[in-house]
Amino acid sequence: MPEKHPTESEILEHLRSHQLFKSLQDKTLNHLQQHIELVPLPAGQVLFTQGEQGDAMFTIFSGTLGIYLKDRDDGTDQGIAQLEAGEIVGEISFLTGAVRVATVKATTDSILINITHTALKETSAKDPTILNTITNTIRERLHKNQMLGVLPDLFGPLPDKALDAFVTNATWLHLDRGEILCKQGEPSDSLYILASGRLRAVVKNPEGDTLNVGEIGVGESVGEMGILTGDVRTASIYALRDSSLLSFSSDFFTEISNQYPDLLRQIAKNVVHRLRMVQEGRQNQVATQLAVFPLSPGLDSFGEQLVEAIRKLGNSVLFLNRNRFNALVNLPNAAQLTLDDPSSIRLQAWLDEQEKRYDYVVYQADLDSTNWGARINQQADQIIFVANSADDPKIRPVEKMLKSDVKTTEEIPESLVLLHRKSFSRPSGTSGWLTLRNIQDHFHVGTDSDGDMARLARHFTGRAVGVVLSGGGARGFAHIGVLRALEEFNVPIDAVCGVSAGALVAGLYGMGLTYEQIFQNFEKLTKNPVDITLPLVSLIRGRKIGRRMQAMFGNTQIEDLLTPVYCVSSNISRATLLVHKIGNLWEAVLASNTPVGISPPVVHNGDLLMDGSALDNMPADVMAAITNGGPVIAVDVNSASDLSAYPSYGKNGLSGWRVLWSRLNPFVDKITFPDPLSLIRRSQELSSIAQGRQFKEELVDLFIAPPVVHFDILGYENGRELEQIGYEYTKNRIEELRDELPHILPRSL
């Protein structure tokens, strides 16, 4: 051990020259020096051991220390690094409150300076900025070290010299929740790597609508496209929650890419991959930090129930309510500290550490507006409001608090869960809750239903299973058999999206009817549905089928359905696809089943709606967005090849009298030709079928195409046979692909 202890002036000079303290004024350093402790450490003596709790850090005044990790096989200490005078040790536990990740002992006689939280708090009474300054410096160093771990994943293998260049040229950047990183149309002058938090990318289309195109998680990069092309930003990026980033200038990337050409090729691959994900609707949008805010009393256990459901899916989950948070950070009343309290930076660092350790963190807020609610509002990237469905839907004070915390107009995703008591049959009054709020998704959950909670867990973990049902006239009976088979294999159906006949089956399924009831309603609706009228607008009046649908669905509202249902129609006034998510179910199903030219259009807010298959007969992209990236099952009862005539009737046109004569005269070849209604229905589907063929493979996890093309699309008398074909084909298809469907089939199968 050195014979001479350092003098006060030597200690002050050591602190003044250290990276952690060099930005502090001498007056502050003098205060700090009064509260620090010198620790003599003889060679061979242990400073702290791996797994030990600790809240102090040490800077090495003289001597050297060794860092050791336990060998997994024999438990012996294995040396991995050596620290010299001027370096710091123990800062991770100091910042996060976590246990020591390694054992540290002196390899030579050493003198250390012990800096505790108490020392910093005492000094902060004189200089309140010291905690922020030191803690932010430590966080910056930790994130830069983490950056070295993610760089090879982003840019491929890099030599040490290139890694050093990244560290040297990194600029630290912090965004508060809701704060804009860059705007669409701005120059692309930087690339960013997200160190903590979460970002969202949005674009404005020519019509002025804001579209969500993806989210950026920890370790991902932003801005590659502009670096490659030099073009302006193609999207606006904002912080879903408080976020820290490392920024690199485009000049730096130009210089380092010239030195390491493989780096540029890897960036190009990243850009292509991200564009493909956006095109396929598979962009990263799964939140990992979920904040549960009760809007009704007595719901304190909901967060724990959600955690248990997520764990059953095989995920690691941390549950934090106010009391549990206080206990885990070992700081009384930590949950009630304000966000600007000096200790908040340490608490934030601890939360960042938990995000890395667990797949998901679920926070449970208090019923009232509290500091704990404000903290988890800053931390979460998905807010889940929970209320008893029978309560008044008025806006609560905690909701007003959340809105006041957002610094921009960009919205953080919010979902609503309405709880129903055991005796309920079908929800009602959901619109009262939705009209007052900007809710992204809503769910109905029975208080005694494990299945409802499991569906919720699948949705929030990106595993919700969505089924898309195509149009196809009478062939839509096959959809019923497909759904029946999926249920027999215990495939969870978390959402159903339908077009034309698919919308009819989806609506009936969403009402909770049995498969026989669905079949009977389908059959009843399609028996003699024609009411001929003067063809100034359409061939039929449409009154008969409209009344039948209204009687069938009654006053059922889409938003009141237990299983989410989405009906797709074509807005021919605006040439856009309309996805019906709320409103009268019968009107949505009718709009999706109104063939162009056959039935009169459905008027919706002054626009004209027609059969959804005119624009998209297989809206798998719609369902991919709804399921939050979860599996999509597409059922197609149409065919790329359909309708034919025999024999050829030449180039001089075709007389209806000639067709009739061929059918009456047994001595001439019978002319087979599709009827006008079949031709009209087929013609309206052509573009969407051709377009859908290009995307089925990319968007769909399980594609089911029952062999029903030989049935006429108006052959409603074949319903039983069509239903059975759909059932048998789906069973065989699942058996055939069983090993390829672990993300769809339950684990027990």
Image (tube, grey):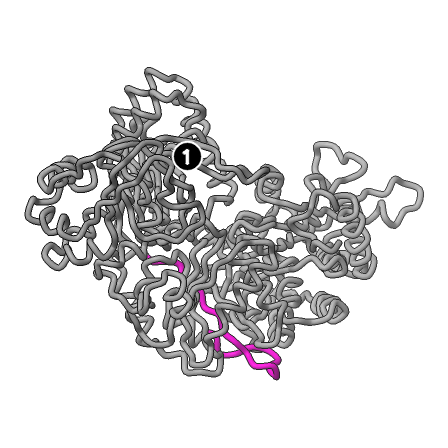
Which residue is painted at 25% across and 55% down in the image? 117
Q: Position of residue 604 (x, y in %)?
A: 46, 64
Query: Viewer-proximal residue, 425 or 574?
Result: 425
- Residue named by callout 1: 150
Q: Is residue 407 visible?
A: yes
Q: Secondary structure at mark 1?
A: helix
Query: Viewer-proximal residue, 117 or 545?
Result: 117
* Image quadrant containing the C terminus: bottom right
Relative placement, left or right, of 35 versus 196 is: left
Relative placement, left or right, of 423 versus 381 is: right
Which residue is painted at 81% across and 42% down in the image? 671
Q: Position of residue 664 (x, y in %)?
A: 88, 50
Q: Amino acid at mark 1?
A: Val
Q: Position of residue 565 (x, y in %)?
A: 57, 63
* Image quadrant containing the N terminus: top left
The answer to which quarter of the image holds residue 236 is top left
Residue stretch in magenta: 411-430
Verify whether residue 159 appears in magenta: no
Which residue is painted at 50% across and 51% down in the image? 625
Q: Is residue 430 above or below residue 176?
A: below
Residue extending furthest toward the left: 27
Verify whether residue 421 appears in magenta: yes
Which residue is painted at 58% across and 38% down in the image? 74
Relative placement, left or right, of 477 versus 440 is: right
The answer to which quarter of the image holds residue 669 is top right
Q: Position of residue 636 (x, y in %)?
A: 68, 48
Query: Viewer-proximal residue, 420 or 507?
Result: 420
Main secondary structure along the magenta-highlighted residues:
loop
